[in-house]
Structures are given as structure tokens and as C-alpha cells.
Image (spheres, rainbow, N blue to C red):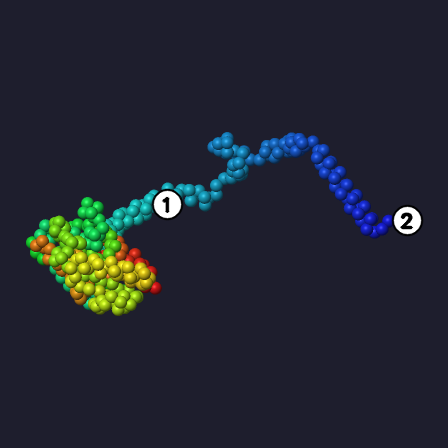
């Protein structure tokens, strides 16, 4: 009689096991689907019997909650519990009295806290405005302006060359100032850190006193790194590009400035190389030639045609000034142009007050945004 190989016998056992598993699965599926309910019905009498033997639930429990309300055996309160219940009203009254005292104390404390907060705000405002002065030893006088109309205008004068007057007006921040006297303009540098030489703020002085509050007047958007303080009425007399004497300058500067200066025989000046006091037609021809040579040689430099306009003379005065600020007489007024020292940006303008008295109009130049912009271009 031939014996089966072990391998075949294992396969036969596996087959038999799988067959039994399939049969078992069929038997499970063959159970009636309502068997679970039948079990529930058989257990119901026992559950009712347990419920009958349990202590009845309090009558105050709503019917919809009785199924889930916990059962508890009602016992006679102990002597200790009865004493605690008797003392409860007194304890509640005592708690109410303590709460009332706390509320009275809080009401008495709130005005004092408010006064301290107001004093703190005034102190912080004063410290913020005066911090840079304390760090550097004081203010720097930039000059004086006059505003006969009583309406001061603060804006980037460089925009006059690109925007018509109606479009420019919304960009001008105005303020009412004394019209019967000259107003000092001061600058306060940052005094510390990487940009210690930059202005913290520039201000028009209106009176004396301690700054206790500030009112925001607006924001000056700057695209040409400069601002002016001038009588708003004098804008009608401003000539931004037209030469007042028929002359103009041509300047260029940059990495390849020396190459172009040698080719075109230009002179070196404080702010670049070029030519000054040329007739307008000749100056325009020079500016065109500078542009052509720059493009053909791919030189890196910038150039500027500068007619002798009001803008030209205001810029010249600022460049000569020791603090980057200069004055200019215009239509029986005195105006000032100063460089922001932070380049372009948006700078808030405030009226600083001592109580109700105006102290100064402050152009805040050192801001989180101006610091970030300066750091980005000076890594």
C-alpha cells in the first residue's frame, strides 16, 4: 500500500481545516436574524424583578430622566448633617456680605487704577518723544519756517514733478499753526544702534511744555527721500521744473562714474560728476549724450538734469546744510526741505500736546517699518 508524501498530507489537512471553516461560516449565517431579540425578551423578566426590588426613585425626577437617574437609598440625616443645614443660611449671609465688601473695594480701586493707567500712558508718551534727546544730549536746530496763512503743509515735494495739483492734495498733511511768528524746526537723532545718526523725528515747535498726549494728523508717503515744511498757500507760486534763470546742471554718479567723466571731460563735484550753470538747451543735450553712452557701454550709473527751479534751490540748500536740511524763501514765506535719512517710506505725523496746549508737530521718522527697510538694504 503506497503512503502519501508528507507534503501532500499537510495540504490535505489544510484543505480539511478550510472546509470546516467554510462550513462553520455557513452555520453562523444560518442563524435566525432575530435571535438577539429573543434573548432580550428572555432577560426582560429578570430586569423587571431587579427593578421591583430596588428603592423607588424620588418623585421629583422628571419621567424623561428616570431611566438614567441613579438610585439611592433614602437614609435619615445624621446629627452632623442637620447642624450643617442649620448653619447654611448664616454662612450664605456671611458670604454675601463678603462679596459686597469685595465689590465696594473694587469700586473704590477702579478710579485709582484708571488714574494710574492714565499717568502711565502720559509718562510713556513723554518718554517716547524725549528718549532720543536724552540719548544724544539734546535737540538739533535745523532752522525756521514762516506760515503766514496759518496752514502748514507737509509732504514729499518730489511728487510735484509727477502728480498734478488735484491729485497731489490728498497726499499733503496739513495742520493749523501760529501765523504771526517764525517757527523753529528741530531734529532729534536716534542716538543708538546701527542707525544712530538717522532722525528719530523732526518737529515744528509750537510752544513749551511736557508732552502728555499725541493726536495723529496723518501719514506722509515719501518716494524721493525728502519732505518739505511750507505754507500751503505758497504752493501756488512753486515752480518745480521750470528754470528761474534759464540755466541748468547735469549730474551723474555710480560705479562707472569715473569712466564716463573721463570720456566726456566732466568735472567732479560733491554729489557726482557733470556740468553746472549750462543754458537749458545745452544741458538737455548733455543729458541725452550721457544716456546714450550709458546704454551703449552698459555702464552702471544714474544721471539727473537739474533746471534751476525752486526744487533745485531747495535741494541745494539741504545738501549744503550740516544736518541735511535747508531753507528757501518763497512768496514772502520761508520753507524748509529736509532729507528723511531713512530713504522712502510712510511716516506718521502727530500733534503733541501738553493737556490741551499744542507743543509741537512731530514727523516720526524712526518706525518699525523704516528700521526694517533700512536693515534690508544694509544687511
- Residue placed under numbered mark 1 in the picture: 91
Q: Closest to the observer: 48 or 213?
A: 213
Q: Distance between the residues labelled 2 and 1?
A: 100 Å
The correct choice, above or below, for 231 with respect to 262 in the image is above
The correct choice, above or below, for 340 with respect to 25 in the image is below
Residue at 29% from the left image edge and 47% from the top image edge: 103
Residue at 26% from the left image edge and 50% from the top image edge: 110
Q: What element carries label 1?
A: helix
103 left or right of 3 in image: left
Residue 86 quadrant: top left
Q: Closest to the observer: 221 or 215?
A: 221
Q: What element carries label 2?
A: loop
Q: In the rendering, at what x and y percent does residue 137 appear?
A: 19, 67
Residue at 17% from the left image edge and 63% from the top image edge: 276
Residue 307 in view:
no
Marks 2 and 1: which is nearer the front?
A: 2
Q: Residues within 10 Å of mark 1 (few under 14, many from 20)?
A: few
Split into 4 quadrants, where in the image is the C terminus?
bottom left
Q: What's the mark number on residue 2?
A: 2
Residue 241 in view:
yes
Q: Earlier in the sequence, mark 2 or mark 1?
A: 2
Residue at 10% from the left image edge and 50% from the top image edge: 149
Residue 328 quadrant: bottom left
Amino acid at each position: 500500500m503506497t503512503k502519501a508524501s508528507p507534503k501532500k498530507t499537510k495540504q490535505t489537512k489544510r484543505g480539511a481545516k478550510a472546509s470546516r471553516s467554510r462550513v462553520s461560516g455557513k452555520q453562523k449565517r444560518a442563524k435566525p436574524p432575530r435571535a438577539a431579540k429573543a434573548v432580550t425578551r428572555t432577560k426582560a423578566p429578570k430586569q423587571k424583578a431587579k427593578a421591583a426590588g430596588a428603592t423607588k426613585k424620588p418623585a421629583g425626577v422628571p419621567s424623561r430622566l428616570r431611566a438614567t437617574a441613579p438610585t439611592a437609598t433614602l437614609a435619615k440625616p445624621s446629627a452632623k448633617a442637620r447642624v450643617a443645614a442649620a448653619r447654611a443660611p448664616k454662612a450664605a449671609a456671611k458670604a454675601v456680605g463678603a462679596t459686597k465688601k469685595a465689590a465696594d473695594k473694587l469700586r473704590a480701586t477702579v478710579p485709582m487704577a484708571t488714574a494710574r493707567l492714565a499717568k502711565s500712558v502720559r509718562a510713556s508718551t513723554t518718554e517716547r518723544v524725549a528718549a532720543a534727546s536724552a540719548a544724544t544730549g539734546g535737540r538739533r536746530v535745523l532752522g525756521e519756517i514762516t506760515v503766514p496763512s496759518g496752514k502748514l503743509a507737509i509732504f514729499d515735494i518730489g511728487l510735484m514733478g509727477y502728480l498734478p495739483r488735484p491729485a497731489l492734495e490728498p497726499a499733503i498733511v496739513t495742520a493749523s499753526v501760529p501765523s504771526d511768528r517764525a517757527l523753529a524746526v528741530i531734529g532729534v537723532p536716534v542716538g543708538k544702534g546701527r542707525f544712530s545718526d538717522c532722525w528719530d523725528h523732526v518737529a515744528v515747535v509750537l510752544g513749551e511744555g511736557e508732552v502728555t498726549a499725541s493726536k495723529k494728523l496723518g501719514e506722509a508717503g515719501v518716494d524721493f527721500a525728502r519732505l518739505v515744511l511750507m505754507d500751503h498757500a505758497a504752493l501756488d507760486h512753486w515752480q518745480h521744473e521750470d528754470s528761474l534763470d534759464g540755466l541748468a546742471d547735469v549730474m551723474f554718479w555710480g560705479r562707472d562714474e569715473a569712466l564716463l567723466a573721463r570720456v566726456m571731460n566732466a568735472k567732479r563735484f560733491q554729489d557726482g560728476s557733470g556740468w553746472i550753470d549750462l543754458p537749458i538747451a545745452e544741458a538737455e543735450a548733455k543729458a541725452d549724450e550721457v544716456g546714450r553712452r550709458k546704454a551703449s557701454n552698459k555702464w552702471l550709473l544714474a544721471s539727473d538734469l537739474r533746471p534751476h527751479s525752486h526744487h533745485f534751490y531747495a535741494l541745494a540748500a539741504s545738501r549744503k546744510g550740516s544736518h541735511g536740511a535747508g531753507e528757501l524763501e518763497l512768496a514772502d514765506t520761508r520753507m524748509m526741505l529736509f532729507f528723511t535719512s531713512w530713504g522712502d517710506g510712510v511716516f506718521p505725523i502727530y500733534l503733541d500736546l501738553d493737556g490741551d496746549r499744542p507743543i509741537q508737530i512731530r514727523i516720526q521718522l524712526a518706525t518699525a517699518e523704516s528700521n526694517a527697510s533700512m536693515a534690508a538694504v544694509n544687511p
